[in-house]
Image (cartoon, rainbow, N blue to C red):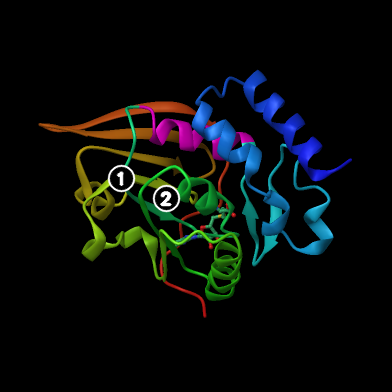
C-alpha cells in the first residue's frame, strides 16, 4: 500500500479513538511520519504504535501525538509554543504546522541533529532547536502560550510553570512507574490541573548527552 493510503487509514483510526480537531487531523494526514524513522522501521510508520528511534528513546504513538496536540490547542490557537523532547522531530513537525513559533529542546545531541535535518527537508522554518535540559524550559524565549513535553518528570518542574503566559497551557505526562497525562492551565490566580489519562512515556532526565 502507498504511504498516502496507509496514512488515510491511520487518520480513520484516530477519529475512531475520539480525535476531532480538524487542524490536527489534516496536519497528521499530510505529514510523512516515515521520514522520521530509520529505514529499518519506516515500513511500520503508519501503525498506531510507538517505535524505537535509537538511544533507548521512542517516537510516540500517533494517537498520543494527536491527543496531546489537541489538548494544547483546546482553548484556541497558540502563538508561541515550547516542546520538550524533540526526539525524532515528528511531534515537532506536527506542532510547527499548527502554531506560529515553536521552540524545541532535546538532551541527546545526535537525535537533535537528525531531527534538524528532517525539519529542514520539510521546510519547516518556524522552529528553533536547542541541545539542552528541557526541564529548565527556555527562559529567554518565554513566556509561552503552550508547553508540550514528550518525556515524563516525576513532578512538574517549577521553571515550566513560571514560563507559562497567563491563559497558557502545559500538556505533560507526569509520574514514574505509573504516569498520567496532565493539562495545566495558568489562570489569573494560579494553575488549574486536569488529569487526562494514563500514559507511558520515557522519563524526563536531567543533563545532556553529546
Ligand atoms: N516527541 C518525540 C518523542 C521522543 S521520546 C518524537 O516524536 O519522536 C522523548 C524524548 O525526550 C527523547 O528524545 C529524550 O531524549 C528526550 N528527553 C528526555 N529528557 C529530556 C530533557 N530533560 N530535556 C530535553 N529532552 C529530554
Q: Please, which residue is most extreme toward the front here?
A: 123
Quarter that holds the N terminus: top right
Query: In the image, is 92 to the left or to the right of 61?
Result: left
At 80% from the left and 36% from the top, the residue drawn is 5
Q: Is the CB of mark 2 within 8 Å of ligand 1?
A: no
Q: Give the vertical position of 127 relative to 19 (above or below).
A: below
Q: Give the vertical position of 199 relative to 115 (above or below).
A: above
SS for callout 1: loop
Quick one: label 2 or label 1, which is nearer the N terminus? 1
Q: Is residue 199 visible?
A: no
SS for callout 2: loop
The reply to whether the magenta stretch includes residue 166 is no
**Residue 206 at what x, y percent from top left?**
41, 65
**Residue 28 at what x, y percent from top left?**
61, 39
How far apart marks 2 and 1 lie (CA) works out to 25 Å
Query: In the image, is 47 to the left or to the right of 186?
Result: right
Q: Which residue is mark 2?
A: 153
Magenta-highlighted stretch: main secondary structure?
helix
Q: Give the vertical position of 61 relative to 16 (above or below).
A: below
- Between residues 48 and 81, which one lies in front from this camera angle? 81
Q: Which residues are magenta?
A: 63-74
Q: Is residue 58 visible?
A: yes
**Residue 92 at what x, y percent from top left?**
50, 53
Q: Residues within 10 Å of mark 1 (few under 14, many from 20)?
A: few
Q: Give the vertical position of 53 relative to 94 (above or below).
A: below
Q: Residues within 10 Å of mark 2 (few under 14, many from 20)?
A: many
Q: Quadrant of residue 88?
A: bottom right
Q: Which residue is mark 1?
A: 79
At 76% from the left and 30% from the top, the residue drawn is 9
- Between residues 132 and 45, which one lies in front from this camera angle? 45
At 38% from the left and 27% from the top, the residue drawn is 74
Q: Quadrant of residue 131?
A: bottom left
Amino acid at each position: 500500500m502507498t504511504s498516502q493510503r496507509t496514512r488515510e487509514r491511520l487518520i480513520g483510526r484516530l477519529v475512531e479513538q475520539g480525535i476531532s480537531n480538524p487542524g490536527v487531523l489534516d496536519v497528521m494526514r499530510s505529514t510523512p511520519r516515515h521520514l522520521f524513522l530509520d529505514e529499518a522501521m519506516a515500513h511500520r510508520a503508519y501503525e498506531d504504535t510507538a517505535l524505537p528511534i535509537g538511544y533507548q528513546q521512542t517516537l510516540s504513538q500517533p494517537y498520543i501525538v494527536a491527543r496531546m496536540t489537541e489538548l494544547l490547542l483546546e482553548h484556541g490557537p497558540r502563538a508561541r509554543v515550547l516542546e520538550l523532547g524533540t526526539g525524532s522531530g515528528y511531534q515537532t513537525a506536527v506542532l510547527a504546522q499548527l502554531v506560529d513559533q515553536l521552540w524545541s529542546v532535546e538532551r541527546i545531541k545526535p537525535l537533535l541533529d537528525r531531527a534538524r535535518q528532517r525539519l529542514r527537508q520539510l521546510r519547516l522554518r518556524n522552529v528553533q532547536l536547542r541541545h539542552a535540559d528541557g526541564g529548565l524550559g527556555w527562559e529567554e524565549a518565554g513566556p509561552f502560550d503552550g508547553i508540550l513535553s514528550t518525556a515524563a518528570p516525576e513532578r512538574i518542574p517549577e521553571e515550566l510553570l513560571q514560563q507559562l503566559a497567563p491563559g497558557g497551557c502545559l500538556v505533560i505526562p507526569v509520574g514514574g512507574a505509573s504516569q498520567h497525562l496532565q493539562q495545566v492551565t495558568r489562570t489569573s490566580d494560579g494553575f488549574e490541573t486536569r488529569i487526562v489519562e494514563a500514559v507511558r512515556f520515557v522519563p524526563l532526565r536531567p543533563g545532556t548527552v553529546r
